[in-house]
Structure formats: C-alpha cells, structure tokens
C-alpha cells in the first residue's frame, strides 16, 4: 500500500516512528549498557565486553559527538553573537547552531532559502528519507519566482498531513525565522561570500530533554544536508 493510501493517523504514526525511532533505539541501547555495567559493578563483578563498549560509546556520545552535532560548522567566538529571533526563547535550555560558508553573495543564496517548504522547493536534504515518512518531498534545482514571498504567519509545511511552521521573520536577503525550528541568517563575508547560519533555541525543561532523547541525531543529519544542499545550488547558479 502506498503512503498516500494509508489512513491519516497511521501515516502520521509511521512518520513519527521513522523520525524518532532511530535515535530512541540508540539511546535505549546506550542506557541498557550503562545499566548493565552499573548492575554488575554493584554485585562486585566486572562488566562484560559488550556492556563496557556500550558504556564507552555513551561517554563518547555525550562528551564528544553530541556537542559536535550541536555546533557543526560554527566557531566558538561566534556562538554568543546575537541573531534575529533570539528573543523568542530568551533563556533556552539548549542552543543548536549550524553554519556553512558559501562562495556566493547573499543575494544569490537567499532565493534558495526563501522557497523552502514541502509545498514549495523542498528542504534540499535527503528527500528519499523524508518520503519514507510520507512527506512527498521534491527538492527544487532552480529558483522559482512565484515562491519568493512569505508573510509573517504563513506556514512552511514539513508534511502534507501535519501543521506547518509559522513564519516569524521574513527579512530578505537577511533572515528567515520559523516557529519551532529557529532562524536562518545570511551573514556577508565580503562581496562574494556568505555565511549561512541556522540557530535553534529550545526552552528549558521537558522540551530540551525530549530533543536530546529523540531528535538530536535526525535533526543534525537532515539539517547538515540541507545547508550543504543550499551551498551547492547557490555556488552552481551563475545568476
């Protein structure tokens, strides 16, 4: 049965399982390894090699991999710089910031960013993964003039059956803000070079915990590919 033939509830459940299931499985395996090590040590026994390897992987993930994923492409001195939209979550529990340098001026990068959305140019990421979740995504490889305008409050769709993300900032060719995601900012690096930064600020408490347990890995994988997809398109566009 094709995705579009499934009842809405089942299709959304499948999308959620595909989005969150991978990280939940990883976190569960790491937690089981830690628990096994703790139980054997409490009984005065040496942990087995599999549990020890899982414990080492857990330490490496928390201490090295997760911080690297949170700040991919950025530099420490720039992480404290204020960006448009920071005031939406003034005291976050977690800040995720990714960036990529693009060999093109902001005016050439902005049109690709302006037309993102499931109902427009896609997200320039792994469309085959998004379509496994029923997103019906198609990534544009050209700029569409009819997709260049948004108004604050317009929704940018991720999935055809789920609510979209309201636009909070639309300031060409500088910034695009999306509620629930964060803000995309274009910073000129001279006349023909631009830095594309995306920053998400997650509220303290349960939202931060849920993100770390279920979304950190898929978010990083898909957003990194998106930034590289925009970079490739903008640099290849002679106009």
Image (cartoon, rainbow, N blue to C red):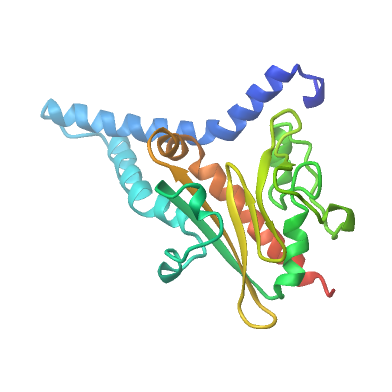
Q: Is residue 208 left or right of residue 227?
A: left
Residue 20: x percent and y percent?
A: 54, 33
Give the image quarter of residue 203: top left
Q: Which residue is at a point 63% across and 22% down the rendered structure image?
A: 13
Q: How many marks?
A: 0
Q: Which residue is at a point 72% across and 63% down the rendered structure image?
A: 172
Q: Which residue is at a point 35% across and 45% down the rendered structure image?
A: 57
Q: Residue furthest left?
A: 44
Quadrant of the frame with the C terminus: bottom right
Residue 108: x percent and y percent?
A: 76, 70
Residue 179: x percent and y percent?
A: 60, 43
Q: Is residue 39 left or right of residue 9?
A: left
Q: Which residue is at a point 43% across and 57% down the rendered structure image?
A: 68
Q: In this rendering, is residue 86 above or below 129?
A: below
Depth check, front residue: 126 or 75: 75
Residue 169: x percent and y percent?
A: 65, 53
Depth check, front residue: 106 or 142: 106
Q: Residue furthest bottom?
A: 191
Depth check, front residue: 4 or 190: 190
Q: In this rendering, is residue 39 above or below 87?
A: above
Give the image quarter of residue 180: top right
Quadrant of the frame with the N terminus: top right
């Amino acid at each position: 049965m094709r995705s579009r033939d499934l009842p809405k509830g089942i299709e959304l459940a499948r999308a959620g399982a595909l989005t969150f299931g991978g990280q939940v499985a990883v976190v569960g395996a790491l937690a089981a390894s830690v628990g096994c090590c703790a139980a054997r040590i409490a009984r005065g026994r040496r942990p087995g090699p599999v549990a020890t390897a899982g414990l080492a992987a857990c330490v490496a993930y928390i201490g090295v991999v997760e911080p690297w994923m949170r700040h991919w492409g950025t530099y420490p001195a720039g992480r404290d710089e204020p960006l448009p939209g920071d005031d939406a979550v003034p005291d976050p529990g977690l800040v995720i910031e990714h960036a990529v340098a693009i060999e093109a001026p902001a005016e050439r990068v902005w049109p690709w960013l302006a037309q993102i959305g499931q109902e427009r140019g896609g997200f320039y990421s792994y469309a085959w993964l998004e379509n496994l979740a029923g997103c019906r995504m198609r990534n544009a490889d050209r700029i569409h003039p009819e997709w260049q305008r948004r108004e604050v409050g317009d929704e940018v769709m991720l999935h055809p059956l789920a609510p979209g993300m309201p636009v909070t900032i639309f300031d060409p060719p500088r910034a695009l803000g999306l509620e629930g995601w964060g803000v995309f900012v274009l910073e000129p690096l001279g006349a023909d070079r631009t830095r594309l930064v995306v920053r998400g600020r997650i509220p303290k408490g349960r939202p931060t915990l849920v993100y770390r347990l279920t979304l950190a890995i898929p978010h990083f994988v898909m957003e990194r590919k998106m930034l590289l997809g925009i970079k490739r398109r903008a640099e290849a566009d002679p106009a």
